[in-house]
Amino acid sequence: MIYALNVFNFVSGKEAIYADYSVKAGKIIYGLGGRVIGSGYRPIQHLKTDVERDQFIVVQFPSKEVFEQFHAEAERQDIHRLREEATTDYIWVLFEPWDLRQWVKRY
C-alpha cells in the first residue's frame, strides 16, 4: 500500500474543471482498488509554508504499480490536462505507510 498526497490551489473560476477531473480520476482510482482516504480545504491556519495551498487530498493505492497504472490510464484518457488547467502550486508526493507508534517505540 502507498499514499499519494496532493496539495494545491484552485485557479479562480476553474473549480468545475477540477470537479470533472475528480470524477474521472475517481473512477480510475476506485476501479484499480484505490480510494480517497482524506481531503480538506479552507485552512484554519497556515503555519509554516513557502506557498500557501488551500486544498489537499490523500489517496491510498494498493501499490506503486497500481498508482502507475492510474497515472498511465489518466494520461490515456487525457484527464491530466483538466487538473493542470484548474490548479496551481500542485504538489504530488507518494509515501510508503509509516507505523508511527512502532517507530516512536524504537526511540
Image (cartoon, rainbow, N blue to C red):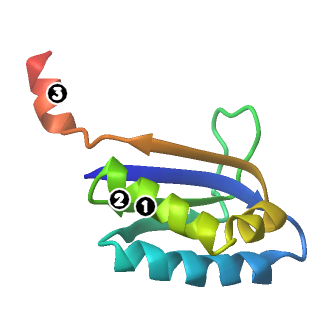
- Rounded to the nearest angstrom, the CA distance separating label 2 from label 3 is 27 Å
Residue 96 at x, y percent in the picture:
31, 40
Which of label 3 and label 1 is nearer to you? 1
Q: Can you identify the residue that label 2 sits on?
A: 66
> On screen, 64 above or below 39?
above
As drawn, the residue found furthest toward the front would be 76
Residue 77 at x, y percent in the picture:
63, 75
Q: Can you identify the residue that label 1 sits on?
A: 69
Q: Can you identify the residue that label 3 sits on?
A: 103
Q: Earlier in the sequence, mark 2 or mark 3?
A: 2
> On screen, 69 above or below 79?
above
Quadrant hosting residue 18? bottom right
The one nearer the camera, 18 or 13, is: 18
The one nearer the camera, 44 or 79, is: 79
As drawn, the residue found furthest toward the top would be 107
- Rounded to the nearest angstrom, the CA distance separating label 1 from label 2 is 5 Å
Residue 16 at x, y percent in the picture:
77, 84
- Say which element carries label 2: helix
Residue at 55 percent of width and 75 percent of height: 25
User: Contact, CB < 8 Å: mark 1 with mark 2?
Assistant: yes
Residue at 26 percent of width and 43 percent of height: 97
Q: Earlier in the sequence, mark 3 or mark 1?
A: 1
- Rounded to the nearest angstrom, the CA distance separating label 3 from label 1 is 31 Å
How packed mark 3 is, by other alpha carbons closer than 10 Å (few <14, some 14-19, many 20 or more), is few
Please state which amino acid type lies under the numbered disc 2: Val
Residue at 63 percent of width and 57 percent of height: 44
> On screen, 104 above or below 57?
above
Please state which amino acid type lies under the numbered disc 3: Trp
User: Contact, CB < 8 Å: mark 2 with mark 3?
Assistant: no
